[in-house]
Image: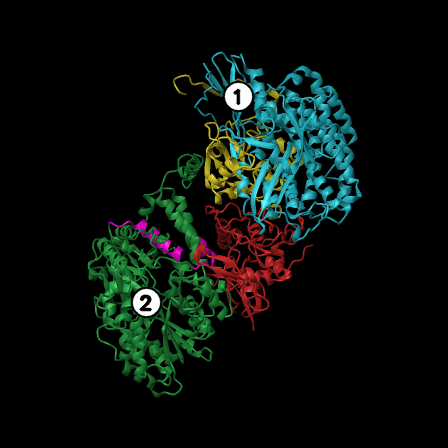
Amino acid sequence: MGLDADAVLTRHGRDRTRLLDMLWDIQRAWGHLPEDVVAGIAEGLGTTANDIRETASFYHFFHTTPGGRYRIYLADTVVARMRGYDEVRARLEQETGATFGGPPDPTGSFSLLDTPCVGLSDQEPAMLVDSVVFTRLRPGKVADIIAQLRAGATPEEVANPAGLPHDDVAYVDHLVETNVRTKGPVFFRYPTDYRSLIRDCLVLTPEQINERISESGLRGRGGAGFSTGLKWQLCRSARGERKHVICNADEGEPGTFKDRVLLTRSPKQVFAGMVIAAYAIGASNGIVYLRAEYSYLIDYLQRQLDEMRADGLLGPAMMGRKGFDFDIRLQVGGGSYVCGEESALIESCEGHRGTPRLKPPFPAQRGFLGEPTCIDNVESFATIARILEEGPEWFRAMGTADSAGTRLLSVAGDCSRPGIYEVEWGTTLSAVLELVGAQDPMAVQVAGPSGECVSVAADGARQIAFEDLACNGAFTVYGAQRDLLGIVREHLKFFVDESCGICVPCRVGNTELLRGVDRVMAGHAAHADLDEMVRWSQIIRGASRCGLGATSPKPFLSTLQRFPDIYRSRFRTPHGVMLASYDLDEALAGYDAAMRELEEDVS
Amino acid sequence: MVRKIVIDPVTRIEGHGKVVVHLDDDNQVTDARLHVVEFRGYEKLVQGHPYWEAPVLLQRICGICFVSHHLAGAKAIDAMVGAGTSAHPIPVAAEKMRRLGHYAQMLQSHATAYFYLVVPEMLFGMDAAPEQRNVLGLLEADPALVTRVVRLRKWGQEILQTVFGKRMHGVSAVPGGVQKGLSVAERDRFLHGDDTVPSMAQVIEYAQDGLAVFHDFHAAHRDEVDTFAVVPALSMSLVGEDGNVDYYTGRLRVVDADRRVVEDFATQDYLAHMAEAVEPWSYLKFPFLRALGREAGSVRVGTLARLNVTQTLSTPMAAEAAQQFHDYTRGRANMMTLHSNWARAIEIVHAAELIEQLLNDPDLLSEDLRVDPGPDAWTGEGVGVVEAPRGTLLHHYRADRDGAMTFANLIVATTQNNEVLNRTVRAVAQEQLSGRVEITEGMMNAIEVGLRAYDPCLSCATHALGQMPLVVTVLDAAGRVVAERVR
Amino acid sequence: MTPDGAARVHASHELPATPPPAQTVEARAGKIPIATISLCGCWGCTLSILDLDERIIPLLDAVTITRSSLTDIKRISGRCAVGFVEGGVANEENIETLEHFREHCDVLISVGACSIWGGIPSLRNTVGLAACLREAYLDSPTRVPGSPPIIPRHEEIPRLTTTVRPCHEVVHMDYFISGCPPDGDAVFSVLSDLAAGRPVNLPTAITRFD
Amino acid sequence: MTIQLTIDGEVVTTTEGTPLVEVAAANGTYVPTLCHHPGSPCLGTCRVCAVRVNGAIAASCSLGARDGMVVEVNTPELRDLRRTIVEMLFVEGVHNCPSCEKSGRCQLQAVALDMRLEGARFPYRYPDREAEHDAARIWLERDRCIFCQRCVEFVRDRETGKKIFSISRRGERARIELDVELADAMPPEQVAEAVDLCPVGAILAKGVGYDVPIGQRRYEAWSLRNRVLGRRPS
């Protein structure tokens, strides 16, 4: 409390691009974004309050109206629903007296909100109480947490009774598990000697580093799989006085959590990769864009950066090299999946809505603040560090022709050993399923909702590789007992919620696709309706502005291809000439409802 | 065995209606009702919309008398913005353009209702084959007449096209005036005719067809016409300062059977004078004069009522016809349902003559078409009343200072006639069905003939929510409504 | 029909009627039968058919009108080549009527804004049925003082649908003629194409949305 | 630099980097647009100008011409795609042409007419969107907004450069906001410009409407297609 607009502005140098940081400061101080403080920020930045709200209202962790003293965000994910989400949700409502999405409880203590995957699929159900995370929830545990909060404990005190310092890995480990199941050649087997690595790299020329990265055959680990070496060369040759390196730690694909684990177990391997990238392209500014769901990592990561600065591995004239000034700051997001899209992420870093930009130009040409920007994923940077330690040939020798090296998998769902696995590209689906202890698996969601839902029976021999089953790291196993159509619906709903809304096919089309699946589920669809939905899907994928729309119909399309019976079994034979999609009961339900309402009125 | 006979839908009217007649064991009619089966909710759905779009939105209540709705709305909006006062009078040319459109609609609407919907009975009889007694049969029997009617209607429609930009649901009136005047070429086209439209003189000639058809029919069937459904009621119309009917502006006047004035009030005071009852069996309300109560205070509006209220009509041929009409009842009010068609034929002539006067009026060519009273004149409320073809039409609006509609009350002509329509249904049912063992389709058509005389626009009437089916319901001996629904 | 005391119900169009004269039957034999209906609309689109003006007369050499608000034919009997449907679907009677048309017409055409997207009556969808009924019957300024509150509700009047819907969301519609209402030219163009057995090809120039 | 590419099989010559939508128009091929505003930065929001470039679907407003490009515009599949996007807009909002003041000079309507839009393939939504009418001279009718962002990007306070229109929320809940104070400071001609800039009837000037008679309205007097192609009315 008491933090006024001026203090916030001063803290962030009255820099419009730091708007997200300002909004976080205000929200932490006031519990929401009060109108007068927003107006003060607007005035201080020479803009309008609406302009500030334009940014703020894009992100689901910012609130323009007061809520309960604590905002509880329960992760609503497919995996959580397999693990007792419903009971937890009901118990939360019961214990707090609030309803999800509704107003706070009468005492003003709690607001309940849904949130998409928070990167804890191996320990669901999970929730955030403001920025403090609680995992492996059970109704009893929820009751206990709420009771403690009611009794006056802060979420922080409930979660961390020992008072572990936040910048210590012990604190992070106390809150969440990392569940590293395999220690592979690239990650976790042994720590990176980042000091030597950076020193050795700075002896090389930037061109030499670029060559090595190109030779390694590394493709971006974020999902799109663009050649990292080529991207760096484009960025290096792009004209610009200042260049930037951004690490995309906005791990939002439902089902994935490997970047969280990398940042917990190997943060300096990641940062070393960023330093090397900066050197290779000639960048002076680094940003780690961390999703807000991982806020409990902030102090820990800040400490890692501080240690590197103290070591002379970040900051001006790094390692004595005049002219190589590079530092990294953390930018915390505000809750938005689409910010994982690189240009949306850049917009967000600039203090704007996370709206994907039109491409071209690509970030390597015009990125952050319009300047050349190299943006790579957490796993990519960690991989880069290892490639330069071990050499491109070593890396190239692993994997397949088009997919060099290894891939981290975030495994969750119906398996006995959920967690993080490092596998060589080219590993088959069946092999992975065996590795993770899959239980009566029917389907696997490879690469999350934006990837493919494949059939264990039909696709077991397929390889995890860009040339076959591309995978961004999410690997969710569905047992034979799962309601696949229900899962499709959840995923489509996720894309509807996370669409930025800027372009028509994605904004409107995804909602229509969701409604189409709802009609199928309600028994209000015939075969022709599915053909229509396939056509809509093609249009959404082809005409949307960014990757979200390009992939959002995939839950529908891939299940329709692999599991057509989940749709066919719901078809209704239309009776008479009336279309299957016309719901006669619904059509007349409003009349009785209106009459009841009016009768209450008049009596 | 008690019987219930249903006419569903009532045809050759605009809108959806259903009539249900109940007969007891002795074949006596125990009840007969017109059920209006549609509701649309216009009073509510216009709220929140910008006031200047209201007359364009609300004219969609009706595809027949949209001009009336457009103009009633425009007058309400005029009052809302403070136009039409002595300080900010509506320009003369603007009012005349509005009148031109209004009269053209009167002409084409009456021509449509009369020739396409009513005349077939006069030619073929009420109990002719349903396949024959309609405009198709008319065309087969008298193609020359139909051709003249088509040309007459087209001329009226083309005027609407010229004034409103479209034959239906166009736009002319804007707050404080109209958007467009008449060009010399446009005027001359309607005065002199061309390849596509007849001349004014031809129109006057065609307009008289209606009267001729009525008089021939009346002469041959005088008793039948004069005794068919004589339904007493008060008569209401808008009248000008001289006490004669004015289709566009004036005060509301109500006369009794002796054509004595029983009420006379300014339109904006309607709430003090009028109330509306609701019945569970119809979506259509039942307006009446508050002072007299529902039984005595229900009024008839439309062609017959206007002739009853007015002393004369302002154009020569129509004045002569009106005199003849008044003489027929020796100066008393005419309550003979089928004489509505006589009155309609007279008004077709009157509308043609009024248009002729306007087309020859140089004011129409003026470019002074709109007054802007400025923001200070804003009142935020207005009542607009016009005489639509079917009778008195009232729009009452309120908007907030931001310009958003907050309220609309609409009383349309067919609603005004609701009580009288039901009385007519009962009267015809009694006359035609009571005591009959065998009931024929033709007898039931007689009920529809009674309704068609009012040219009921159930589309207008059901602006409130939906559609008005006409059904004839038959109640059982105990007056119980039979549970079964017939479609 | 209920067992005790209930009435026998007759529809007027099923009662004994005068048969059409032989020349009427003969004159219409072999013509293409068409039908028209207005659901929740203003009847303007139906009247647009009259806006064919003189063209309607030769057209009636080739086609004849069965069920229509212009005729007294209350049900389509036999097959109908073309059905024109004006208006959206706003009550249960509309649904039944639309089904009747779909069952009996080879080609069904949505005519006008209401039929195509619900039109102005569909603005009630955002307001809600209860609010509309309340405004019309309970909160009306002309409500009789002291009268009991009545909302019309009766077996003879149809239940209203939750929302007003376009026809093609209820049954398959073959063609669409947009406009509020469409110009007579548009109706003529479609009808001429159908009568001549040509594919319907409505020129953009005579199409409108308002 | 002068380059060559093909549009629907015809070789055309243009300057590298010219937006494809403009290259097409200059060569007699009409591509519909809603957000594109010639001379202003590309918005790329509506996607109605989708074409195929070298086999992949792309918004032709946002792509500059390059040598050798193979552009397809008028294939049945692409026409259907563009029409579907317009249908999406029609079901998403309440596009009440019958009473809308902008009818006849509405770009969405003109595009839809040109495409012969009929009943939409998606169920209509009939959203309940609140109008913004606190400003003295501007009425924001959100029912009709297609979220093209023209007003957000191109209408600025003339003194300070501040945004008068902005966005709030995201996804299907995103909507346009109006800064009432700045709106009230707009000179009348800027209000008229904003109304004109809006491709639908979402931005209206209060109390102003239906000034142009039906039949003489912008896209009746000279169709959108012919305007884009620069064909004067005869």
Please give left or right for residue B234 compared with residue C41 in the image: right
Q: Is residue D173 above or below residue A357?
A: above
Q: Is residue B74 above or below residue C9?
A: below
From the image, which quarter does the N terminus of chain A lie in?
bottom left
Chain letter for mark 2: A
Please give left or right for residue A376 compared with residue A365 in the image: left
Q: Which disc, if any, is residue D169?
A: none
What residue is pinned by disc 1? B32
Question: Which region of the structure is painted magenta?
Answer: A481-508
Residue C49 within the magenta-colored segment of the rendering: no
> In this structure image, what is the colour of chain A?
green
> In this structure image, what is the colour of chain C?
yellow
- Any idea which chain is the cyan one in this picture? B
Q: Is residue A88 visible?
A: yes
Secondary structure mostly seen in magenta is helix
Chain letter for mark 1: B
> In this structure image, what is the colour of chain D?
red
- Residue A110 image offset from top left, x and y in percent: 33, 56
Q: Nearer the viewer, residue A142 or A58?
A: A142
Report the amino acid beneath label 2: Ser
From the image, which quarter does the C terminus of chain A lie in?
top left
- Residue C56 image offset from top left, x and y in percent: 64, 34
